[in-house]
Image (cartoon, coloured by chain):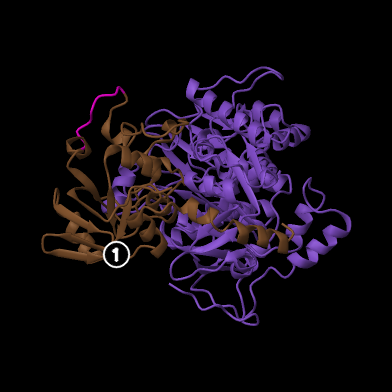
Amino acid sequence: MLNEPIKTVTARSFVIRDANVDTDQIIPARFLTTTERGALAEACFHDWRFTPDGEQTDHPLNTVNREEQRILIAGDNFGCGSSREHAPWALRDFGVEAVITSRAADIFKSNALKNGLVVCEIDEAAHAALLDREDLEITVDVVNQTVTAGNITASFKLDPFARTCLIEGVDPLGYILNQSDAIARFEQETAA
Amino acid sequence: MTTPSPSETSPKTLFEKVWDAHLIQPETDAAPALVYIDLHLIHEVTSPQAFTALEQRGLKVRRPDRVYGTLDHSTPTTPRAPGSKPIYINAAAKKQVETLEDNCRRHGIRLAGWDSPERGIVHVIGPELGLTQPGMTIVCGDSHTSTHGAFGALAFGIGTTEVGHVLATQSLLQSKPRTMRVTVDGRLPHGVGGKDLILAIIAELGAGGASGHVIEYAGEAIEALSMEERMTVCNMSIEAGARAGMIAPDATTFAWLDGRKHAPKGAAWEAAKARWASLKSDPDARFDAEVRLDGSKLAPMVTWGDSPDMAAPIDASVPRAPEGPAAEALNYMGFKAGEALMGETIDAVFVGSCTNARLSDLREAAAVIAGRHVKPGVRMLVVPGSEEVKRQAEAEGLDAIFRTAGAEWREPGCSMCIAMNGDSGRSGERIVSTSNRNFAGRQGRGVRTILASPATAAASAIAGAIADPRRILEASHAQ
């Protein structure tokens, strides 16, 4: 079973400057009662984008062109908090294909990469430069692990397996299932 | 990315011992390590799509005997008569619970369902039932799985895709995390407990300060902690960004586990204890990072902002000249720069969550509030962590103490910690909460959360303002 390979993402960007943006901001917990996938675009940053009455706020996220601006430049420690995979699901449903930050929270990063959401952790200087510019044309090159925006270039490092999964569309579960004999052996040897 | 494999004789950390014992395949240049998972805990919120993914591929659950489910996040905590049906916040919550009931039935997975005396918050019942044991690998689709590390287990939260991986293969691809030791010297002063300690540690490390690391908590203050306090400390490791938190098992651990339903019995118990006694970092083991704190200098801690690392001693003031995130946080909380924390008015108090809803937590809050009353106009919810905690608390009369004081005594569940079951505050309200996250909107849209210990929460309920529990405890003592 293969996923859609992702070798590059080229799109315009939008910025969320704040550090420590947690998963409760990305998707408030009351939207976690879903048992399905693919309908969380409205839930994405819901309480930043909508008033309690459901009207749009004046938050800059409401001016994002979701068709075009598919790369999010985010502040440090993005995605901290809960392990809810609904956070990358919501970002994907909103239209985001890559998040560029100086540091992403561990579980968020792991979840994102399993959902075709590329997470690029770049050096602080380049990050600071990108945070200051709205709506740039950016190319994320997953193969060479670079981010290019005009004259700004930065590199990022993905876990090699996560990178392979992205660029070749490898499904990690298929990979683990191929190790079934080793798992069975481990269970026998440890009497697990 | 290849880590040189240490020889059998080289000193190892506690984490490395547990990690190495579960390696099906070590990390290579091309792939992360494949790690065997001993115990997989599941709940209704992060599992439905994982079961769907399995079924779409025609896969079975590999080891249903190593999976245990409970209902906690979406479940109502409103008091109900025995045998009566729970009333959910909405149809989606009901469907989510029914989906887990159905999935467990079809895959032969044990479920602590509505009629089970074992039901409760996933991180409360694992230890309570003795499912959680030293040296195990434990995962759950929940970031506070780090709680179980208090027993010397390697326990961490995973996403729903990985829940599917573990259901199908009982194993997980993992890059080896780095190690950090947080050593707490001295003894905690009277009136200062595990919750205060972990808030102080998070303030020291920062919200992302332990990213990519597994923390081992060590030192005199840690060794002196009760098992429940150790769980509170490990529980909030994630609030410093850590992958997991661990504490070496010792006599306290063994005493707590002895006789629990799933703990080994008889000769197996003695053998297990001998095995578990080796689960500690070797004297010369090297950690990637070391942090030291003096526990004897700590005071009760509360948070003043919207990130758990924005914490301060209760007798301190909020920042005097805040900039950036600190200024925004004070604005969100409705605090003025430089104000003293004590005396800040509050609207509600929540005693509960996987951080602080065990029997000892309820006893701690009850000791403060006994014979006193919740300030009129302040709402206080006490939500036991499990059916078992509830039964024991009621047997001791704690429920009566809380009710008499004017608090609500509720059914077990995650409740107002994650506020997805209908238990939430109103916009603008300040809530002193024994839970783990003070993120904006966590306890309801616009709600302002102040994290604190059960004792501080109870003292604050009485005062209707942030209050130091030591004063009440001293007054009680003097009487």
In the image shown, does A107 or B354 lie closer to the viewer?
A107
Badge 1 element: loop
Read off the magenta span: A53-59
**Relative to B290, is B334 on the left or the right?**
left
Quadrant in the picture for residue B456: top right
Which quadrant, please, contains the C terminus of chain A? bottom right
Q: Residues within 10 Å of mark 1 (few under 14, many from 20)?
A: some
Amino acid at dot 1: Phe
* Residue A19 in sight in this render: yes
Q: Colour of chain A?
A: brown
What is the x, y in percent for residue B236? 53, 52
Residue displayed at 35% across by 56% down: A168
Which colour is chain B painted?
Answer: purple
**To which chain does the residue with label 1 belong?**
A
* Residue drawn 25% across the image and 24% down it: A55
What residue does disc 1 label? A156
Q: Observer-nearest residue: A33 or B338?
A: A33
User: Of helix, strand and loop, which mostly describes the magenta segment?
Assistant: loop
Residue A85 image point, x, y percent:
43, 43
- Residue B117 in magenta? no
Give coordinates of residue A24: x percent, y percent.
Answer: 40, 41
Q: Is residue B44 above or below residue A191?
A: above
Give the quarter of the image for residue B380.
top right
